[in-house]
Amino acid sequence: MTPNDLQHGLSANRAQVVHQLIQVLLVGFAIGMTRTVVPALAETEFGLARGSFLLLASFVVAFGAVKAAMNFVAGRWSERVGRKRVLIWGWIAALPIPVLIWAAPDWNWIIAATVLLGINQGLCWSMTQTAKLDITRAEERGLTMGLNEFSGYVGVALAGVLTAYAAEWLGARTGLLVFGMTVVVLALMLTVVWVQDTLPWARAETAAHKAAPPSFMPRYPKGVSQHPGTGEVFALMSWRDRRLFAISQAGLVEKFVDALVWALFPVFLVQRGATLTELGWIVGTYGFVWGGSQLFTGRLSDHVGRFWPNVLGMWISGAGVAMVVMGSGALWWSVSVGVVGIGMALLYPNLSAAVADITPPAWRGSAIGIYRFWRDLGYAIGALGLGLAASLTGAAEAAFWFVAISMFVSGAVLFWLGEETHPRLNSAVQPETAHA
């Protein structure tokens, strides 16, 4: 198949989109299997001392640091060796994870397992996202990201519920071993057999833009070479372009929410009398609302733009986090995490779509990788911050207030420095118009 034969769009590439959605569902399963049982049973099963908030958060810090680094390199690797090969590497890295958790004599083995999980997630989730952006059209980016994150976070939620039941039926270690190995082996087989490399679509899009610029010209960063190096892209994403900086800092801070739900929320609920299956359903509500809502919020941003969904999403999520500690009971906690999930659904696919809007296809993979580097570094920074807040005060509630305030402040920065990125709603002046 030649570049001229390649078509962009969800409909034209329906089979590959489905394969990539299955992949990100399985990626969600891989991380979701560690989010309910492992932190809830950290004391009884893995020997962690009661009240060791910083040690409890340590596995999320390790995960975030490693995943951030792998996001950074995944984009560059994928532009050299292709998306599929990087996806395969990610699943190979995941093979030892269930065994490490099953055999873990202490908490250090859990940290080692989450290091490998960070490698898996950084490579695999990055590639499923980049691959779908390669093969869809600009006006479908919000919907594409919504579908991607819907599939992934429904996977996270389902895995949290399923592993809670598996732990009760088979025991925590055996339940996680059976579930985890099934997921990883199935994902690796499907990748090798069915997934197609999408790098040729990205190259075809670059060639098409040169031949005939799109009707609505994106507001790409100015003064950038056609094929910028890693350092130049990193500088653009991190400080040189104020819009990309605003998006990157928002991505970093919103991960504080996920670090909180992962590291401390299970402990918070168990200490207040929730059973393991109740915990699975409450935390699952967060994932189901977040994942399910993205089917609509991603598509919504294709019509109304990225700016307001992103800003409001930051503030709504912060309000939901604060609500958790302002009441009690399973119903109140479920409603509160549902509010958090709605806010996350507004911002999560649309921050990534905003990056894709204003970065050229020639280096979009690198830009998304660096955005995801900053975003997932938020796991490490957020887990460290909320662990310190809880340790210094001796109360898990302090971690919730730390995260809520951070979300409000970051949303204000995004409001101040960001702008609408959708090319149709905020188009750059075409070159011929500028010289007229």
Image: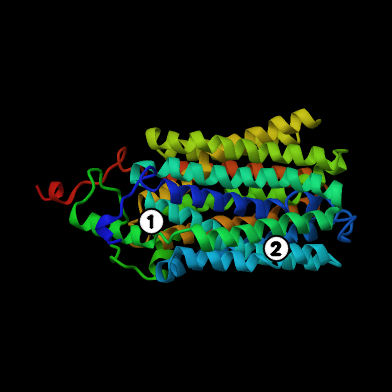
Q: Nearer the viewer, residue 409 or 290?
A: 290
Residue type of the residue flagged with mark 2: Thr
Q: Nearer the viewer, residue 217 or 415?
A: 217
User: In screen coordinates, is 409 left or right of 305?
Assistant: right
Q: CA distance from mark 1 to mark 2?
A: 33 Å
Residue 377: tell me if it is visible: no
Disc 2 marks which residue? Answer: 114
Q: Residue 423 location, x and y as percent?
A: 31, 43
Q: Quadrant for residue 93, please give it.
A: bottom right
SS type, badge 2:
helix
At x 79% / y 50%, what residue is drawn?
A: 37
User: In screen coordinates, is 48 left or right of 283?
Assistant: right
Q: Residue 157 location, x and y as percent?
A: 67, 43
Disc 1 marks which residue? Answer: 241
Q: Residue 358 location, x and y as percent?
A: 35, 51
User: In screen coordinates, is 358 left or right of 368?
Assistant: left
Tell us which disc is closer to us: 1 or 2. 2
* Disc with the residue nearer the chain's start (1 vs 2): 2
